[in-house]
Image (tube, grey):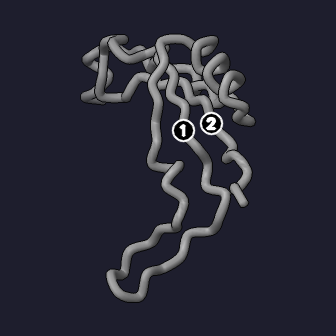
Amino acid sequence: MRSPMPTARIIEQDRKTTQSGRAKAGKWTLEFENERAQRHDPLTGWVGNATTATQVRLAFATREQAIAYADKHGFEYRIVSAPPVKLKLQAYADNFR
């Protein structure tokens, strides 16, 4: 008996706070959610589960490509957009007040 297909998250890559450029902004990643609770391995002390689908991450150039892939393979999915970038504009002299 096969287990049901996991639910996928389609995530927009946001710009890191340490980056000033937009090199990876606008890219999308498809990853699978955990369907089962993770368990503690008494031998190694690691935490995990038997599902390896959560280790898969697929990169896409556009949101539409990621949605088309999920639809083609019959995955349920949800879209997670990147939060808007908030710029704090100030003068250099404001650092010394």
Tag 1: residue type? Answer: Glu
Measuring 45% from the left and 48% from the top, which residue is drawn there?
Answer: 55
Tag 2: residue type? Answer: Arg
Measuring 61% from the left and 48% from the top, which residue is drawn there?
Answer: 33
Residue picked out by circle 2 = 9
Where is residue 71 shown, x and y percent of the image? 71, 23
Quadrant in the picture for residue 41: bottom left
Measuring 38% from the left and 74% from the top, which residue is drawn there?
Answer: 46
Q: Quadrant of the N terminus?
A: bottom right
Q: Quadrant of the C terminus?
A: top left
Report whether 50 appears left or right of 24: right
Q: Are marks 1 and 2 in contact (CB under 8 Å)?
A: yes
Where is residue 18 shown, x and y percent of the image? 30, 28
- Are there few (<14), some (14-19), or many (20+) residues within 10 Å of tag 2? many
Q: Secondary structure at mark 2?
A: strand
Residue picked out by circle 1 = 31
| 42 w.r.t. 33: above or below | below
Choose between 76 and 72: the one closer to the eye: 72
| 6 w.r.t. 63: above or below | below
Sequence-wise first label, 1 or 2: 2
Measuring 50% from the left and 28% from the top, which residue is drawn there?
Answer: 29
